Image: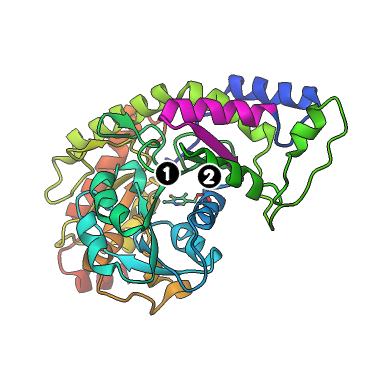
């Protein structure tokens, strides 16, 4: 079975973990600081605040942006559900905007009609690593005092307007879950260039403490902490951060490999009529965190059926990006039609893409897809009858 994703981990990660274990300090400490500094520098932000997940990062981003009960936050429905959940964690209401069919991302044009008196923030997602066009969103939202938070969960190593994603907004959230390009097992980080936000975020992730536990440990005198506001336990461990430092060193290679595999897919999939593949937008370059394809409207099998058929051929794919408003948790909450979102979520699937994927495996994926798209009898009813 060809897996849809697999993290790229090796000896260097082992060594880094071992050093942390032998140091005797495994919770948030010097490795977390090193990882924060390295990632912020790599992505063009002044500060990194490491957290337990990107979901925690999005939640804290909204808290420090002043979002609370009674507020609305514009988000794409077409995203992993954590984007909408973070809004609920902050006590606010997600308002779902439609996306651009080419990038799968919000645009200033899809956001604009949903801005109202209660809109406090917008979360722009760089879906599957595809950079969103953030500058026009700032041009729309900044004059209105609406905060722009970037959900860059998938976008480490992606490029927007010739600079890495991470330095274009006050609050940019990354994920290090194993499905993403760089992993720490679980983990997240907020990048910001605002010192005031960084200070508050560090406090909120650690129970609202005035002095962090690791600072107190390092001090040569007794330091008594205060609890300045109700906070959370959203800390990353030094075990996770040590892996993150190693993975970050390899980021350029990880992204280059994904882009080479994506080029190979694009060439081979060109032979399948009507199958649409991801393309870099004029404003940036994707890291191809996920390789999604959109099926033609006249494809013989429906998408879910196709996933099962590909699985039987030894190819593990996934449905495309989910749509939160079609899940029970958010049923009936869309305030406007979302035609592009609904089309993409029903007609797209994610093909295997990971560092160690071979050319032969890519051929197997494309051959399986070609066979299923062409070989199945055209009228769907007949196909089902034939299987029965
Ligand atoms: C994975 C993902 C998240 C959640 O990241 P975690 O680190 O697992 O909390 C949020 N948003 C998007 C778009 C994602 O793909």
Residue at 24 percent across and 36 percent down: it is 284
Tag 1 secondary structure: loop
How would you rate the neighbour count of disc 2 (Cα within 10 Å): few for under 14, some for 14-19, many for 20 or more?
some
Q: Is residue 206 above or below residue 252?
A: below
Q: Position of residue 237 (x, y in %)?
A: 68, 37
Instruction: Using the rendered image of the protein, determine whether residue 36 is visible from the camera's viewpoint.
Output: yes
Q: Position of residue 304 (x, y in %)?
A: 34, 62
**Magenta segment, principal secondary structure?**
helix
Q: Which mark is residue 218?
A: none
Residue at 79 percent across and 27 percent down: it is 218
8 left or right of 15 in image: left
Q: Is residue 53 above or below residue 255?
A: below
Q: Nearer the viewer, residue 24 or 119?
A: 119
Looking at this rendering, what residue extends furthest in the right direction?
222
The region drawn magenta spans 30-51
| Quarter of the figure that contains the C terminus | bottom left
Residue labelled with disc 1:
170
Q: Is residue 61 above or below residue 304?
A: above
Circles 2 and 1 in contact, beta carbons < 8 Å: yes
The image quadrant of residue 223 is top right
Tag 2 secondary structure: helix
| Quarter of the figure that contains the N terminus | top left
The image quadrant of residue 254 is top left
59 within the magenta span: no
Looking at this rendering, what residue extends furthest in the bottom direction?
332
Residue labelled with disc 2:
197
How would you rate the neighbour count of disc 1 (Cα within 10 Å): few for under 14, some for 14-19, many for 20 or more?
many
**Which label's residue is closer to the chain start, 2 or 1?**
1
């Amino acid at each position: 079975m060809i897996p849809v994703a697999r993290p790229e981990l090796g000896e260097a990660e082992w060594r880094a973990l071992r050093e942390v274990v032998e140091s005797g300090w495994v919770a948030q400490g010097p490795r977390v600081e090193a990882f924060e500094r390295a990632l912020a520098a790599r992505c063009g932000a002044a500060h990194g605040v490491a957290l337990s997940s990107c979901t925690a990062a999005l939640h804290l981003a909204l808290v420090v942006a002043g979002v609370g009960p009674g507020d609305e936050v514009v988000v794409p429905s077409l995203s992993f559900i954590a984007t909408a959940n973070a809004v609920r964690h902050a006590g606010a209401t997600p308002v779902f905007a439609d996306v651009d069919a080419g990038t799968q991302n919000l645009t200033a044009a899809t956001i604009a009609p949903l801005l109202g008196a209660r809109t406090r923030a917008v979360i722009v997602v760089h879906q599957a690593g595809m950079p969103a066009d953030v500058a026009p969103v700032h041009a729309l939202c900044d004059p209105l005092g609406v905060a722009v938070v970037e959900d860059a969960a998938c976008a480490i190593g992606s490029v927007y307007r010739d600079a890495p994603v991470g330095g274009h907004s006050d609050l940019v959230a990354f994920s290090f879950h194993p499905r993403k390009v760089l992993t720490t097992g679980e983990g997240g980080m907020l990048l910001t260039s605002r010192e005031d936000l960084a200070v508050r975020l560090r406090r909120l992730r650690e129970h609202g403490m005035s002095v962090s536990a690791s600072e107190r440990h390092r001090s040569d005198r007794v330091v008594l902490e205060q609890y300045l506001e109700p906070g959370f336990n959203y800390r990353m461990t030094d075990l996770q951060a040590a892996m993150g430092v190693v993975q970050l060193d390899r980021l350029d290679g990880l992204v280059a490999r994904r882009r080479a595999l994506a080029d190979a897919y694009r060439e081979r999939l060109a032979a399948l009529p009507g199958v649409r593949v991801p393309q870099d937008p004029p404003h940036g370059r994707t890291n191809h965190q996920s390789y999604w394809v959109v099926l033609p409207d006249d494809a013989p099998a429906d998408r879910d059926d196709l996933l099962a058929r590909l699985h039987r051929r030894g190819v593990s794919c996934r449905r495309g990006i989910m749509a939160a408003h079609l899940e029970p948790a958010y049923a009936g909450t869309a305030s406007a039609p979302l035609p592009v979102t609904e089309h993409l979520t029903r007609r797209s699937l994610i093909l295997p893409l990971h560092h160690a994927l071979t050319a032969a495996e890519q051929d197997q994926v494309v051959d399986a897809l070609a066979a299923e798209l062409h070989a199945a009898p055209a009228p769907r009813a007949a196909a089902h009858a034939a299987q029965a």
